[in-house]
Image: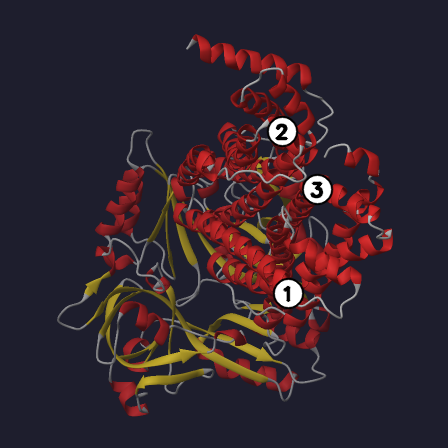
């Protein structure tokens, strides 16, 4: 123990005396760790901040400890009694509606997310207005609205707007709506009214697509999950969906899970790529210090002393890079949050997340250990004479000696990946994949050396012959350069593939031939009148209307062996339709955009007299359903059973009406319901006149302009694409650092060989040409490999992480790859220019 302490104490004193705080030779190491630590700390802190906000504000975001909701039917007397027995209750309705001003052709209308609340609202948090008032439900005949509604209608606060059958005064502008996040996606700005005002508007009729919500404030000692489950079991046929304060916004949780996972993988990729640069930087630094190391050996320092002295200096430089990276990552959170402002569920503030910072620091230091250990051990194992004559002496293999520190680092890295990760298996496979790619690129580097030694040299120019010889000479950095170039070019390719795939998805998933209007809650008895009104004002326009209901699947399968949804521990993958209520419809004929793939569609007579259903084939495959099986649903509190008559393939991309379940009229047509409709206008149709007429004649229906929805979707996808591009650019910076590290690591030997060539008569132009040829050959060969690797990474990000189609613009990807290769050749050649300035005398003295 004393010997151990004294050895390390001596090493610390010598390292401190010899250490330069200008970090000469170790700056690249610091840059690599700085980039990786900054990326991981920023990502971890941002994700921790968002999750902390969602967790700590769960009651406020949800509006209660429990929320129970269903479509089309308010709670009955028994259900209200059960709710009130749990605690304080706040109920209300949510629906899409249309607010309008003006009259005739001067009518201006905008869709709103109507929110009717009772006097108990809000149970948690505060509803505040821009004028500073803290309020609850607005008085009868008044509304609190989002300021965006005023902009859309061109009105001021205090104006009257038409809502259904009544006029409502805009009495205040919302500054903070505590439960806004839990309301989910909306097709318009929120408008809060009282339940009395909703009754005056007469918007809710039998079959309306209103969603009734009830929030409950439980006693402090109550079991939240047990209370929610107990209510659902008590009213099994009620089609109730529940949420608790622990999962106040599942959509936000899923968003942060996917985005956080992607950003974490970006940070790990940057750190892993930078690790190769770390190895090159440490190798280059130790090579530049061979005179000092030899002097230590001559005066009696052991190999262990040499390693300890330089390990301390590497650790010191690593800590500087990591600490600086952590600081920048922490300070960059607001900037990163602003870039993702269109995607983040809550506002991100400064938050000191100790775990995120410690985890980022541990990742960075472990990568430093894994990649810096081999060159440090190499410096320990060589003799003083070999160090003095390193230009002509090969070093011994060090991997056996480096196996312990590298192995320990890898084990700890895997352990850190598994601790606290949202998807540990994905992270593990990512690291395994990165290691496989690293090994593949190294093998390609060895293959290039092998081919360079055997290619014919006759007939080639001097620069070409010298470039080929440089790839296979003793000590040539071909493997390191191949690894660096491969990673760098793959990063260029992956970014281009992801960016163009996102751009194509935005264009392809939002069709140009979409209908002009969606109409919700069209009374079933007025469908013909609606069609006639559109034909009168916009002749030649196409109107499509379908019955529109909401229901939930209770059970499915063979009639004698039904599977009950409430007994499932986990929802099968792809069976999203089992979660809560879904849209239902009935039809006599096969819906447009659908094709029967199994079974037969019912005839008009069969459809009217039998209880049949046609199921989306993807859902059928997920649930192992077939023709002849049984489906049991809950519709407005009643249980209905139907036999599966056919399976259908649905064209989801036309923005039309697509339902996973289409019933025969005889199955559900007798239930109260309204219709939904689409309107595709003829060229030259007067939009303003049509909209004014529809608002007057159908005040209880919501007319939604599709163009506005498409713009909103494009904005969201555009923000997502920009965020991915910005985050992935970190890997490009890391790739450039790796390339510089590989070049720096070979600079000493390059300088020596350049001097030898110059002494033998080679000109500077010939030496520079040889360097350019070497990098051009490497870049050309590795561009092909990078094209495949980058494409695979892009596919994984788009398909596996974001569940989006992978359809990149390959010509653009290839052009970016060629541009990246050209940039790499220029940068690498420019970075090698200092070897041309090497003085022959100083280089020859080292022999």
Q: Quadrant of the C terminus?
A: top right
Give the residue number, with chain letter if any, for mark 1: 500
Q: Secondary structure at mark 3?
A: helix
- Tag in front: 3 or 1: 3
Q: Identify which residue, 170 or 452, lies in the foreground.
A: 452
- 198 to the left or right of 693: left
Residue 111 in sight in this render: no
Q: Earlier in the sequence, mark 2 or mark 1?
A: 2
Q: Position of residue 719 (x, y in %)?
A: 64, 55
Q: Residue drawn at (26%, 71%), measured in percent from left and top? A: 624
The answer to the question of whether label 2 and label 3 lie on touching residues, with beta carbons closer than 8 A, is no
Q: Secondary structure at mark 1?
A: helix
Q: Earlier in the sequence, mark 3 or mark 1?
A: 1
In the rendered image of this protein, does residue 463 appear above or below residue 659?
above
- Tag in front: 2 or 1: 2
Give the residue number, with chain letter if any, for mark 2: 385
Number of other residues with Cα within 10 Å of mark 1, as a class: few under 14, some 14 to 19, many 20 or more: some
Q: Position of residue 175 (x, y in %)?
A: 62, 41
Q: Secondary structure at mark 2?
A: helix
Q: CA distance from mark 2 to mark 1?
A: 56 Å
Give the residue number, with chain letter if any, for mark 3: 749
Q: Position of residue 779 (x, y in %)?
A: 68, 60
């Amino acid at each position: 123990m004393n010997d151990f302490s004294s050895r390390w104490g001596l090493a610390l004193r010598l390292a401190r005396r010899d250490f330069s705080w200008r970090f000469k030779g170790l700056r690249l190491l610091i840059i690599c760790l700085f980039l990786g630590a900054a990326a991981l700390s920023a990502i971890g802190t941002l994700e921790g901040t968002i999750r902390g906000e969602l967790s700590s504000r769960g009651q406020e975001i949800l509006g209660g400890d429990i929320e129970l909701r269903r479509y089309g039917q308010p709670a009955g007397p028994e259900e209200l009694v059960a709710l009130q027995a749990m605690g304080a209750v706040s109920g209300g309705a949510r629906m899409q509606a249309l607010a309008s001003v003006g009259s005739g052709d001067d009518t201006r209308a905008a869709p709103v997310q109507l929110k009717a609340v009772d006097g108990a609202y809000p149970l948690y948090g505060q509803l505040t207005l821009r004028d500073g008032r803290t309020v609850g439900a607005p008085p009868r005949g008044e509304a609190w609205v989002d300021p965006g509604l005023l902009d859309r209608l061109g009105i001021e606060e205090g104006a009257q707007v038409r809502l259904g059958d009544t006029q409502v005064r805009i009495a205040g502008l919302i500054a903070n709506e505590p439960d806004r996040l839990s309301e989910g996606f909306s097709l318009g700005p929120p408008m809060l009214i009282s339940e009395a005002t909703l009754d005056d508007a007469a918007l809710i009729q039998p079959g309306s697509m209103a969603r009734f919500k009830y929030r409950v404030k439980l006693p402090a000692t109550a079991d939240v999950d047990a209370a929610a489950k107990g209510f659902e079991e008590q009213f099994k046929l009620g089609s109730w969906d529940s949420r608790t304060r622990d999962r106040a916004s599942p959509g936000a949780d899923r968003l942060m899970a996917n985005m956080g996972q992607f950003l974490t993988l970006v940070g790990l990729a940057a750190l892993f790529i930078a690790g190769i640069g770390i190895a090159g930087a440490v190798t280059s630094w130790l090579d530049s210090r061979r005179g000092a190391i030899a002097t230590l050996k001559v005066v009696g320092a052991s190999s262990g002393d040499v390693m300890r002295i330089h390990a301390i200096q590497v650790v010191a430089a690593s800590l500087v890079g990591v600490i600086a990276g952590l600081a920048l990552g922490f300070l960059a959170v607001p900037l990163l949050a602003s870039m993702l402002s269109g995607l983040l569920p809550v506002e991100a503030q400064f938050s000191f997340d100790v775990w995120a910072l410690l985890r980022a620091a541990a990742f960075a230091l472990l990568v430093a250990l894994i990649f810096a250990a081999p060159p440090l051990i190499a410096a320990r194992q060589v003799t003083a004479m070999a160090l003095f004559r390193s230009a002509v002496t090969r070093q011994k293999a060090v991997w056996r000696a480096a196996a312990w520190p590298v192995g320990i680092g890898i084990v700890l890295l895997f352990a850190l990946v598994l601790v606290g990760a949202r998807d540990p298996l994905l992270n593990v496979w990512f690291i395994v994949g990165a290691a496989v790619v690293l090994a593949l690129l190294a093998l390609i580097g060895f293959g290039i050396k092998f081919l360079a030694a055997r290619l014919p040299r006759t007939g080639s120019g001097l620069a070409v012959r010298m470039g080929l010889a440089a790839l296979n000479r003793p000590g040539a950095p071909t493997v390191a350069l191949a690894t660096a170039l491969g990673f760098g070019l793959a990063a260029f390719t992956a970014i281009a593939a992801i960016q163009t795939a996102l751009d194509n998805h935005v264009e392809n998933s939002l069709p140009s031939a979409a209908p002009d209007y969606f109409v919700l809650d069209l009374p079933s008895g007025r469908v013909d009148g609606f069609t006639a009104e559109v034909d009168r004002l916009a002749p030649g326009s196409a109107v499509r209307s379908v019955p529109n209901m909401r229901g939930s699947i209770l059970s499915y399968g063979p009639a004698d062996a039904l599977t009950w949804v409430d007994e499932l521990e986990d929802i099968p993958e792809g069976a999203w339709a089992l979660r809560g209520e879904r849209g239902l419809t009935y039809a006599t004929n096969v819906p447009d955009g659908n094709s029967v793939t199994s079974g037969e569609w019912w005839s008009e007579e069969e459809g009217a007299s039998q209880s049949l259903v046609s199921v989306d084939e993807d859902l059928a495959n997920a649930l192992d359903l077939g023709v002849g099986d049984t489906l049991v649903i809950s519709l407005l509190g009643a249980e209905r059973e139907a036999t599966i008559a056919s399976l259908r393939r649905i064209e989801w991309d036309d923005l039309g009406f697509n339902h996973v379940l289409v019933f025969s009229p005889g199955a559900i047509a007798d239930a109260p319901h309204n219709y939904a409709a689409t309107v595709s206008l003829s060229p030259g149709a007067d939009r303003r006149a049509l909209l004014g007429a529809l608002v007057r004649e159908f005040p209880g229906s919501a007319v939604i302009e599709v163009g506005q929805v498409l713009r909103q979707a494009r904005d969201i996808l555009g923000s997502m694409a920009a965020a991915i591009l910005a985050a992935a650019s970190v890997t490009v910076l890391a790739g450039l650092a790796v390339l510089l590290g590989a070049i720096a690591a070979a600079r000493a030997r390059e300088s020596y060989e350049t001097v030898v060539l110059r002494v033998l008569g080679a000109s500077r132009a010939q030496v520079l040409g040889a360097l350019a040829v070497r990098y051009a050959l490497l870049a050309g060969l590795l561009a092909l490999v990078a094209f495949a690797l980058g494409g695979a990474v892009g596919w994984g990000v788009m398909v596996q992480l974001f569940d989006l189609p992978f359809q990149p613009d390959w010509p653009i990807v290839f052009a970016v790859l060629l541009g990246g290769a050209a940039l790499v050749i220029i940068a690498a050649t420019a970075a090698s220019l200092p070897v041309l300035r090497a003085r022959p005398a100083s280089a020859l003295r080292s022999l």
